[in-house]
Image (cartoon, rainbow, N blue to C red):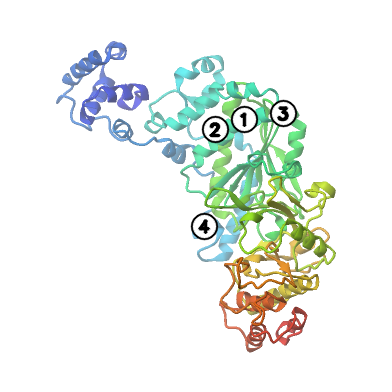
């Protein structure tokens, strides 16, 4: 036996007996070279006697142990000295070696953005997406990992003796130094193999919750450990994690979600006992990695998925099929029984095989600002959620704590009345409530409701577009954006309200495909839409915004927005803000005509948004 083959328990005991690190390393070397009888004697001896026996073994070694690093070097020396667990190295180097997609990531930056040669990078992304689909449908999960999963033999001995197939996936051997000290990985796979989680979940009965607990302790635990130190931009979530979501939203969001670079590449459905309903959920809930219409030029990879019902689990690959977001789902595993050790370890194996492909595809993920199904939260200093946004395929769910919102002028009823009034306008350049059919839209009004806490408003909004952070890169694009935002402002003003928070972060862009696939939309290509009306106010709001309480917003630009005579925020204040926020600090020099419009808006020479829309700069093609 070599020093690398000792068990963790043996090395840990020697370390505890040792008066020094140097003595511990010598003792490990000597113990590893002792006879079986001598090793057994040390194992069963009391601490004082065991120390004496080890001292005797050390004395018999050439050079009295040969020095601190004669045999127990590398990983074992690190462990003896109290060093780190080697699970990450074992996973990174052996288990989750990137799957060969037949593409190179050379010359490609993070998120799929090329450092040079954009055409080459785009071609590589297309090839990678195609290769992922091919890998998913060509026996990926039947392939072994590059190394077996380490387990603690003492805890799973019965399972190993009862099913010889387990030897294809796991090992109790400790000859591999990295595997020997991969304690977190060893515990994770041992827990899966032994079925420790069944003692917890069986108390929950045959429910959806029981299935979720079983799968979380297999899927989430494995992925969390593997992703901990792979250097990937990933996130995981579960639909049941946020109790503020109603039953309608739960029917639209998968039970388990994993994003890589904001692309939804792995999901799961968990039901109490009906496998067919779980599979149907995979079809119905977010079946593409992103909204296809928002990235019409990006090549869509496949999405991996699992359906679980009771103890039955099955894996699938979901691939795009033609245009318009249609998909095809392919079975890529047999029915797995997680009520058995073999079924549980197969689930762990399959997850790691899927992760191999995702690691290889990660450099080719397109730039996605908002993940489909992801929840973005703004949290206050006390941990309370100030606002959250969730992206669904056809609408955005938004929640806002009105009691914590600076500068608000309207309560829930005022907001509800405003949004419903705007519902009759149907301006393509202004955000609107998404009609989800009666009470499913979130209450008696549909599209907007107040949470039971009496202070958090929930809105379901459309259209879904690409959020902006800054001005467009060209004057032609800026002209189109300003024209569209002014049209939205004009509709808002006509309904009797002012926006009060116009900035690029409150504007979204709809590409051509999104414009024509948005429900009940007649919008042309590259439409810009003004969103975020939670800081809006009635246009005849009578209070001086320069006086307390503070109705001014911290995001207001330095320009003089308020009416100089009354201190009120008026319709012209919106126009002044638009010029200051959208037409200043541009990445290019604005033409004379554009500068003229900006100046007229800032100095209140144009009395309305309709008048501004007739300016010569906006009438140019």
Residue 620 lies, in percent from the top left, at 73, 84
Residue on which disc 1 sits: 213
- Circle on res. 144: 2
- Circle on res. 110: 4
Does residue 583 appear anywhere in the picture? yes
- Circle on res. 546: none
**Which sits in the foreground, 226 or 531?**
531
Q: Is residue 420 above or below residue 54?
A: below
Q: CA distance from mark 4 to mark 3?
A: 40 Å
Which is more N-terminal, label 2 or label 1?
A: 2
Residue on which disc 3 sits: 272
Residue 256 lies, in percent from the top left, at 64, 40
Q: Is residue 36 above or below residue 483?
A: above
Residue 415 lies, in percent from the top left, at 74, 60
Does residue 137 appear anywhere in the picture? no
Mark 3, other Cα within 10 Å: few <14 / some 14–19 / many ≥20: some
């Amino acid at each position: 036996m070599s020093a690398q083959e000792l068990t963790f328990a043996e090395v840990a005991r020697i370390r505890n007996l040792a008066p020094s690190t140097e003595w511990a390393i010598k003792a490990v070397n000597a113990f590893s070279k002792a006879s079986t009888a001598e090793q057994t004697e040390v194992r069963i001896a009391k601490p004082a006697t065991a120390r004496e026996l080890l001292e005797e073994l050390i004395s018999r070694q050439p050079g009295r142990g040969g020095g601190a690093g004669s045999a127990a070097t590398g990983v074992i020396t690190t462990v003896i000295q109290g060093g780190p667990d080697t699970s990450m190295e074992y996973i990174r180097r052996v288990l989750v070696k990137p799957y060969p997609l037949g593409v190179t990531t050379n010359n490609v930056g993070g998120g799929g953005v090329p450092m040079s040669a954009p055409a080459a990078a785009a071609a590589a992304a297309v090839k990678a997406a195609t290769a992922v689909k091919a890998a998913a449908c060509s026996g990926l999960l039947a392939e072994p990992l590059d190394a077996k999963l380490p387990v603690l033999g003492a805890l799973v001995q019965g399972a190993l003796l009862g099913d010889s197939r387990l030897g294809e996936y796991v090992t109790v051997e400790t000859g591999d130094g990295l595997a020997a000290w991969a304690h977190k990985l060893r515990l994770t796979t041992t827990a899966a193999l032994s079925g420790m989680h069944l003692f917890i979940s069986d108390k929950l009965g045959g429910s959806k919750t029981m299935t979720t607990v079983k799968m979380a302790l297999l899927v989430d635990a494995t992925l969390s450990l593997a992703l901990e130190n792979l250097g990937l931009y990933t996130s995981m979530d579960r639909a049941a994690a946020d109790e503020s979501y109603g039953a309608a939203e739960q029917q639209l969001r998968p039970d388990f979600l994993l994003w890589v670079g904001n692309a939804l590449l792995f999901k799961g459905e968990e039901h109490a006992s009906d496998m067919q309903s779980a599979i149907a959920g995979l079809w119905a809930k977010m079946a593409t990695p992103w909204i296809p219409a928002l990235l019409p030029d990006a090549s869509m990879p496949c999405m991996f998925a699992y359906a679980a019902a009771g103890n039955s689990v099955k894996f699938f690959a979901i691939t795009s099929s033609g245009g318009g977001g249609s998909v095809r789902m392919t079975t890529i595993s047999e029915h797995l029984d997680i009520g058995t050790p073999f079924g549980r370890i197969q689930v762990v194996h399959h997850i790691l095989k899927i992760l191999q492909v995702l690691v290889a595809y990660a450099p080719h993920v397109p730039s996605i600002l908002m993940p489909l199904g992801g929840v973005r939260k703004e949290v206050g200093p006390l941990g309370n959620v100030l606002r959250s946004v969730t992206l669904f395929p056809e609408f955005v769910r938004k929640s806002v704590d009105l009691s914590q919102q600076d500068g608000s002028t309207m309560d829930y009823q005022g907001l509800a009345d405003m949004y419903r009034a705007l519902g009759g306008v149907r301006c393509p350049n202004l955000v609107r409530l998404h009609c989800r059919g009666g009470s499913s839209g979130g209450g008696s009004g549909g599209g907007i409701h107040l949470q039971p806490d009496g202070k958090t408003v929930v809105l379901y909004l459309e259209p879904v577009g690409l959020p902006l952070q800054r001005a467009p890169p060209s004057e032609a694009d800026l002209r189109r954006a300003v024209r569209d935002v002014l049209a939205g402002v004009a509709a808002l003003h006509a309904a009797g309200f002012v926006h009060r928070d116009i900035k690029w972060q409150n504007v979204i862009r709809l590409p051509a495909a999104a414009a024509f696939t948005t429900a009940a939309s007649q919008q042309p290509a590259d439409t810009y839409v003004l969103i975020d009306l939670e800081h809006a106010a009635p246009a005849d709001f009578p209070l001086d915004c320069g006086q307390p309480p503070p109705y001014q917003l911290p995001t207001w630009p330095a320009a003089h927005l308020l009416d100089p005579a009354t201190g009120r925020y008026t319709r012209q204040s919106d126009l002044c803000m638009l010029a200051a926020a959208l037409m200043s600090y541009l990445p290019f020099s604005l033409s004379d005509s554009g500068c003229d419009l900006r100046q007229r808006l800032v100095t209140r020479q144009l009395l309305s948004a309709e008048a501004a829309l007739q300016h010569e700069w906006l009438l140019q093609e």
